[in-house]
Amino acid sequence: MEWITAENVVAVATALLGVLVSVGAVWIDRFKPQRKRLGYRVQLNTPLHKEGDDQDGGVMTVRAGEVLGSAAAGATLVLLRIENDRDLDIGIDDYGVAPAEHALRITFGTPAVTVRGVVATVPAGWGPVRDDLDSAPKLGREGNAVLVPRVALDPGQYFKLLVQLSGPVADRDIKVHGTVAGGSLRRNRSTTPDDQTGRFSTAARTVTVVLTACVVALAAIIVRERTPPPIGCARGSLTVTGSTAFAPVVREVAKAYEKDCAGATVTVDAGGSTSGVRDLAEAGTRTGGSPAVIALSDGHGPAGHPRLREHMVAVSLFTVVAHDDVPVHDLTLEQIRALYRGDVARWDRLTGPGLPAALPGLPVLLVSRDAGSGTREVFQRRVLGRNEPANSSRDCATVDDPEAKVVRCELDSTDQVLATVARLPGAIGYAELGAVATAKGLHRVGLDGRGPVLDELGTSPYPYREIEYAYTWGDPPSDSLAASFLAYLARGRGQDVVRARGHLPCATPKGLRICGEADTGP
């Protein structure tokens, strides 16, 4: 059950919570019986003073007899609002007391505080409310309490009680006692004249908040998973062999694949294009099946292996490189060919257009790849038009063969070629373009006035380029790691790495045209 992940569990739980809250709100609104409720709130609670008394700022001052009798020292004025704050009517019989009894008893603190007077006020037009307040037993007082008769209130109706007390009382000590059949009494928040009625009910606000939280949670999960793992991940182990020039690209793609696809291990063991293809063929023959091996080759691999399947991956650019002591930045194809024929043993003997006025008298040191290298095979076919001369040196600096015309050595990898050219004054060699980007002590050499530029592929006659091929033993099973990694490299996210490393993926529109050409020569 691979779908059971932390993110999926949270997403499902959040979605269910949103559905349950919505259903619950509808049920409460449509089917749950509503309860009646009588609410009360304190709207004014302030001490009274006679005119001329020493007063604190902000208190009310009245003259004796203007409101409720004498404003004796310590008197307090309280305004209390009683209201029906639900959508059901509260009738006379809902109070559950006999007609001769008071329905509500409102107490103000301790018995030490007495009620000196009380006045009821009712908004104009609410005659029945006023009549109920005047009915027997009428509004009265008893010690620290105000006694209220039974009053019928429609939804939203209210009346106010203006009470004069003998002393101060805290809002929290003002309490209303009584019963409402099928309902309750509740203290409401006191409002000010600036307060506005809410646009939504409490239930609506609750549903809105919960659903908003659900949407935010789901959005966070979506943002977190904005780069989902690629389709077709596979588990197991895979070895990628072959081209050393393309190896840095494959190593980076392998790391990305292992990060995206848990349970996969991709090992890059590059030893040259020709040897990689042959090793794959031997592994397939030995196992009699489809080995977990992919071989990469700069250009077509060696013939004679009919069971292998060829897959185009990218167009690769290569470049000639020279030691920084050789002040040559462009050579004609004829000049390159003269150097590799052994016709020119010293740089100051090189002739032809585009050369500096004076070349150093350094020996020409040809640093080449071994015979199994695809980079060398492409160089011979597309630049030299023939094979390179025989190997004449083991250390790349001195001649071992006294009959050799020029110093020439062969090395096993691209990295070795670059390091040797950068180390030896007078050295010249060749390598994959992306590998040269960070090399020190050497520089690129153009051919016939053209350089290796990725964006000019397809329009530039620059000759030193080739298609990078991947070989498998037959067509690997669609659910195998070999098939999955090959798709990731050639058509999936690996294309971003391929292009960043200076290659043109064959799966892009431009790459399809170039890779699809029967003749990829200049």
Image: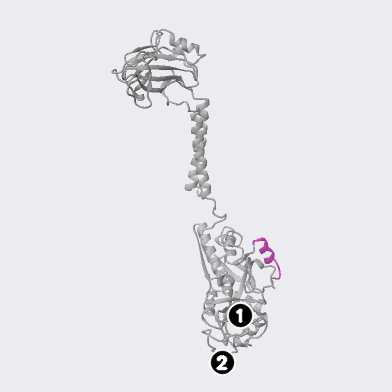
| The furthest residue to the left | 112
Q: How many marks?
A: 2
Q: Secondary structure at mark 2?
A: loop
> Which residue carries the number 2 mark?
402
Q: Secondary structure at mark 1?
A: loop
Q: Local crowd at mark 1 within 10 Å, few (<14), some, or many (≥20)?
A: some
Q: Report which quarter residue 485 is drawn in.
A: bottom right
Q: Is residue 36 above or below residue 433?
A: above
Q: Report which quarter residue 417 is drawn in.
A: bottom right
Q: Position of residue 31 (x, y in %)?
A: 51, 25
- Nearest the viewer among 210 and 277 is 210
Specify the amino acid type for callout 2.
Answer: Pro
Q: Is residue 402 above or below residue 262?
A: below
Are dots 1 and 2 in contact, CB under 8 Å? Answer: no
- Nearest the viewer among 516 and 348 is 348
- The CA span between labels 1 and 2 is 28 Å
Which comes sooner in the sequence, label 1 or label 2? 1
Image quadrant holding the C terminus, namely bottom right
Q: Position of residue 304 (x, y in %)?
A: 64, 74
Q: Is residue 165 left or right of residue 490?
A: left
Instruction: Tell me the residue at 69%/64% (across/down).
Output: 513
Q: Report which quarter residue 466 is drawn in.
A: bottom right
Residue 292 in view (yes/no): yes
- Nearest the viewer among 43 and 515 is 43
| The furthest residue to the front | 52
Q: Is 14 in the magenta?
A: no
Residue 328, numbered label: 1
Q: Is residue 333 left or right of residue 43?
A: right
Residue 244 in view (yes/no): no
Specify the amino acid type for callout 1.
Answer: Val
Q: What residue range appears in magenta?
A: 507-519
